[in-house]
Amino acid sequence: MLHGRDSRRAEVANGSRLWPVDGESGFSILEALVAATILTVALTTLAQLLVVSTRANSGAKTTTYAAVLAQQKMEQLRSLAWGFDAFGLPLTDSTTDITVVPESAAGGTGLSPSPQDALRRNTTGYVDYLDRSGTVLGTGTTPPAGTVYIRRWSVAPTDPANTVVLQVMVTRNRNRDTGPAATDGSRLPDDVWLLSVKTRKTA
């Protein structure tokens, strides 16, 4: 007859013992299932965070590039003549076409007052379309093929007409011009809107 430690060794050898005795290590099936469940939940959460992070980075890149495009147009508008001539008379550029590259001295609207809804709909002379790399594709009321960004601007002289308010908005092409968003003035989170004021100066 075996006693004590020899008896336990015999039980292990015969496979008759189901539970570990004091001092022996190991994992039960329940512990393994709990660990597997925790690992699965952790990996699922990590995957979701990765997707959210990727989308956020993509959105930030799009918004940053749209801001650059808006700033370019604002600089073009601010460079147009808006001042006084040698006789003290108002001097306004109303012909420069900034919808083409390079800009043309004729055929455009310059700093002529724009329609009040120029930022909400595509208005010839106050909109241009750009592809993914920022290349200007043209103007008009309908975006041409390949349009990724729609850039609209408005020109609003104040009263007295010595100051003009310039606004530029860049949005991604989402076919919004035929839907409610094109007329209600709403903007999406990644749209970029800039505002500047230009005052007449003596030439």
Image: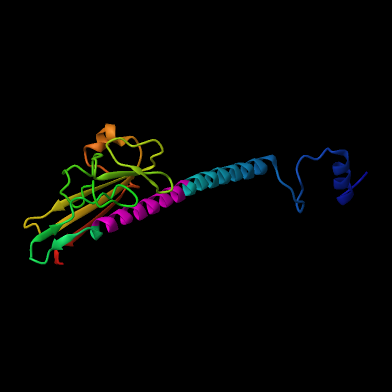
Quadrant hosting residue 82: bottom left
Q: Is residue 159 one of those drawn in magenta?
A: no
Pick the residue in front: 28 or 48. Answer: 48
Secondary structure, magenta segment, majority class: helix
Pick the residue in front: 31 or 120. Answer: 120
Question: In the rendered view, how is the structure colored?
Answer: rainbow
Asked whether, in this view, residue 98 is left or right of residue 93, the answer is right
Task: Name the residue rendered at 31%, 56% in the picture.
Answer: 71
Asked whether, in this view, residue 55 is left or right of residue 155, the answer is right
Q: Position of residue 4 (x, y in %)?
A: 86, 50
Task: Name the residue rendered at 48%, 49% in the picture.
Answer: 53
Q: Is residue 58 one of those drawn in magenta?
A: yes
Asked whether, in this view, residue 66 is left or right of residue 42, the answer is left
Pick the residue in front: 57 or 169. Answer: 169
Question: Which quarter of the figure is the C terminus placed in?
Answer: bottom left
Q: Magenta segment, which residues?
A: 55-77
